[in-house]
Image (spheres, rainbow, N blue to C red):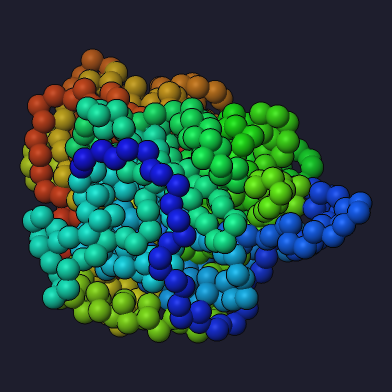
Amino acid sequence: MPATSPAPVHQERRRRRTNRFAALAAGVVTVGALAAAGLPGSATAGEDHRKGGHWPGRYQDVQLLSFNDLHGNLEPPAGSSGRVTEQHADGTTKTIDAGGVEYLATHLRQARKGEKYSVTAAGGDMVGASPLISGLFHDEPTIEALNKLDLDVTSVGNHEFDEGAKELGRLQNGGCHPKDGCYTDKKFKGADFPYLAANVLDEKTKKPILKPYWVWKKKDVKVGFIGVTLEGTPDIVSAEGVKGLSFKDEVETINKYAKELQRKGVKSIVALIHEGGFPASTSYNYDCDAPGAGDGISGPIVDIAKNVTPQVDALVTGHTHNAYVCSVDDPAGKPRMVTSAASFGRLYTDTTLTYDRKTGDIARTAVKSANRVVTRDVPKAPDMTELISKWNTLAAPIGNRAIGYVSGDIGNTGSESPLGDLIADAQLAHGKKLDPETDLALMNPGGIRAPLTYAAKAGEGDGVVTYAEGFTVQPFANTVNLQDFTGAQLIQVLKEQVTGPNAAAPKVLQVSSGLTYTLDLTKSGADRVVTDSVKLDGKAIDPAATYRVATNSFLAGGGDGFPTLGQGTNDVVGLDDLAALEQYLTANSSASNPLAPPKADRIAIVN
């Protein structure tokens, strides 16, 4: 993709918002406010009382609606991926079914109703790792949906690079797919919102591959948006996807373009950052700023927030799929809002930015923010229903085919998940077909995108696993690869789950039947993997012996912070991972004898 020069300050978008669908009220709200002081000088929005005069309209509330990590989930996500946890005042919790663009559209349109100054932004990973309805068509359906949602701007995320920079450029600018062509009689128009990639540079030109920032303007109110993805994107995307690109430090990049925006007269700035944190609670309405041990947020976004210039007024974040509305002190020691709306369109964040026309800046002491649930008790947006129907009709001949049967839900959550065990077993079985000497399989948890649910999703019948459901679980089209490793290397791989880039947030590999070990999370560093507990079929791993290991091609390239997996020898490349899963389900299940969920008891976890 040709590099672009830093973008000029843009005028208000030509597209006018239409079809403000009148819907029922949105979900329960949790409000985070930076201070109780309100507006400077106790002024109210829309007027300013001063000695000797009255200035109407000095302060203008700007509604910022934001979400992140949609991952092409146009239909309501299944199982736990389609729920959020709500915390009540008495400490009890309940789960709420959430998500689906038919409902997200209704909620956003209702939220905008009556708001003259409203802008909608996203924090990356709008596409990639998508269910069949979007992934089968290279995520064109999701871009069409985002256009209808009136998304104004988004940062890129790591998954925007799953198919490389050229494909990202096509999603931005339009045109038919270079190999698969056009899917309908209409040419794909691309996104009518800008993707921002301030810290993603073309290695040859040293310039951002897309616009680094964009300015929303209405009348005399201007707000700049700077978009970045995590610097570590090359570690979690296939090498082909980031070929020819370099990813720069998030803080340095944001600070650079904040200065440029300031020079252009834009003093109100929001950073869209595809990097996130880990709140102390899984509840979407958890009070992140409540005092007490264990409260708050941890993870990479905290250090970023502490170092991004005070010129930036709010941070919309993502990547970790967590929900939080937190205040983190900027380098000047002043609190600043940091938000994330979980993932898959289950939540959106409603932030009020109070714009001071006198200074052109945001009055940060008045900033309020709330995560709202995309409940499914509101009317579906008809235009989204029509869009989903159109693409489902095209996908149906492929997606509706049964590939297996299960006797219950097979979840993908937890350090070791039942679905992780199932996929590892499927890859081991495929590996043994390629080479009977294959000993074990390892699967990265991030490659398992959804659970397998027992309940019928589209009329196929309870317990039936369709190709579309399998695609939703494993959408990356990685191949199953075989490699040789010494026992010492295998143990090192397990230690890399909790060291290096995975030290702060362990990535626990899912393991095939026969491999067992203890993971002691009360210890620190590599010691968390108890070396003498690692056994294969009950026998201790011999450091000097050679083991044949099946992994997907992403792990085989050292992805997800497992460099030792990139050092294997005697490579053999098999079918793609979804084909391996399909073969396993077909061979090991039937309508009369469905597959039972694995017990997830191969890794002994000590907390």
* Up-down relation of residue 136 to residue 500 (above or below): below
Q: Quadrant of residue 389?
A: bottom left
Instruction: Please tell me how many numbered marks the rendered image carries.
Output: 0
Q: What residue sits 73% from the left and 31% below the top?
A: 333
Q: Quadrant of the C terminus?
A: top right
**Which residue appears farthest toward the top when viewing the image?**
544
Front one among 350 and 11: 11
312 shown above or below 101: above
Residue at 67% across, 42% down:
336
Vertical side of 10 occupied by 106: above or below: below
Q: Is residue 339 left or right of residue 459?
A: right
Where in the figure is residue 396, as x and y percent of width and height?
Answer: 20, 76
- Visible residue check, residue 496: yes
Occupied quadrant, residue 483? top left
Q: Is residue 525 left or right of residue 173?
A: right
Write the residue at 63% across / 40% down.
Answer: 297
- The front one of 208 and 602 is 208
Which is more toward the observer, 509 or 512? 509
Q: Residue furthest right?
A: 51
Q: Examine the rendering and report whether any part of residue 411 can be seen.
A: no
Question: Which x, y percent locates residue 311?
Answer: 61, 37
Q: Residue at x 66, y 46 (%)?
A: 361
Q: Quick check: 494 left or right of 345? A: left
Residue 187, quarter of picture: bottom left
Q: Measured from the top left, where is residue 347 in percent x and y? A: 54, 63
Q: In the image, is 583 to the left or to the right of 173? A: left
- Residue 238 image position (x, y, % from top left): 24, 38
If the image is split into quadrants, where does the N terminus sit? Answer: top left
